[in-house]
Amino acid sequence: MLKFEQNIRGNVALGINPLGCKQEVLNQIDYVKNKGTYQGPKKVLIIGASSSYGLATRINLAFGAGADTIGVSFEKGPKNERNLGTAGWYNNIAFREAAEKDGLIAKNFVQDAFSHESKQEVIDYIKSEFGGKVDLVVYSLASGRRTDPDTGETYSSSIKAIGEPVVGPNINMQKQEFYTETLDPATDQEIHDTVKVMGGEDWQLWMEALKEADVLADEVLTTNYSYLGTELNHDYYGGGTLGRAKADCDEKADNINELLTDINGKALIVVATAVTTKASSVIPFFPVYCIGLYKVMAEKGTHETTIMHQDRIYREMIYGDKPEYDEVGRLRPDSWELDSDTQAKTKELILKLNEENFNSELTAYDIFYKEFSNLSGFMVDNYVDQEVTLEELKALKY
């Protein structure tokens, strides 16, 4: 029988608990079901569907709005006892099983979403087995590398400052350390490459391919998640390479809106709030911001996990009656985070942190660490330890 151990290197999770991943998916499904149903899209394509924002979006739309879904992601299954695959592999399986149990279509494409071949396979499936058209396309792909499907050149992203180095506090969860880090400024090439990987180019390629294939319904909506942050993280996020990539998404949204004019479609940038993801855990300084922010928001009753945030975005804002848009038309569910009192208290708290108190009751380190662990199937609510063999895991079908 397999034993699952949480193994962390720095702020990167190496170990996984496949059964815990399944329970976490079921917990998120229960959250949505307990909120009841709402009127939303019925045929949805989610690019980047296996974890964090993408997974939570898929769960919300399926079990809240009754949507059939297609999920595209690049994950790996189990090979041996030391390599059990990725958490997203098991998330995909758990979601499909639960959705099909409720009579919903839940097709998983596990492959490189950046390739032309993947786009064509999804299009062929929509035409042959998914009713011919989709009414919502969610782009939630997070990757550190991207191969341009036309040139074959591979680009790698860099999380760096622009112009001047940034110095600030960070956390090492593996060593339980609070330390000072220096973030070097990016070169022009690193800025360019980060935009190629994390910008909106692939989103636009997907929408062009779907439009050309005539698989987009009239009044189709496509969403892409962004993050702008505040003055507390501007130097390393909004003012860094990540910010340049997000700005490129804004530009590509304009291009997509023009592309969809004749079918009355819309491209919408959703500026999400700070949540715990595998990506946010490794952004320099960001964990410190999170443990301060979460403490303040938890006390105010406004802290959200990914499923809580996505449920509010789609149930209340996009398909509900409580939308909040900024002056350029972006949806702003991050308004709770940007609340002036919340930001002032977060700043005050962060300034008090040191190596002695960063993981004490003064902060929300416990919340951040638990949510980080949940991503790999550990510290999951309602989880009951079970026995499973490698062969049983290998027999699971995505």
Image: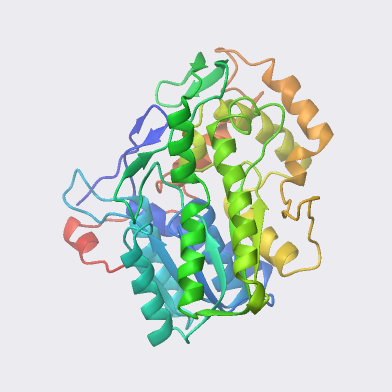
Question: Relative to the observer, which residue lies in front, 265 or 376?
Answer: 265
Question: Relative to the observer, which residue lies in front, 166 or 156?
Answer: 156
Q: Is residue 1 left or right of residue 218?
A: left
Q: Residue at x 66, y 40 (%)?
A: 228
Q: Residue at x 35, y 64 (%)?
A: 116
Task: Measuring from the top left, give residue 117's x and y in whole percent.
Answer: 31, 66
Does any portion of residue 272 appear in the rendered image?
yes
Q: Is residue 38 left or right of residue 372?
A: right
Does any portion of residue 367 appear in the rendered image?
no
Depicted 73 relative to depicted 236: above or below: below
Task: Measuring from the top left, give residue 197's x and y in whole percent.
Answer: 44, 44
Depicted 143 relative to depicted 289: above or below: below
Q: Residue at x 51, y 20 (%)?
A: 185
Q: Is residue 98 left or right of residue 245?
A: left
Depicted 13 relative to depicted 131: above or below: above
How are the colours assigned in the image?
rainbow
User: Which of the 4 image quarters holds residue 247?
Assistant: top right
Q: Is residue 67 left or right of residue 156?
A: right
Task: Measuring from the top left, give residue 203's x and y in whole percent.
Answer: 50, 58
Question: Relative to the observer, which residue lies in front, 235 or 120?
Answer: 120
Q: Residue at x 31, y 39 (%)?
A: 5
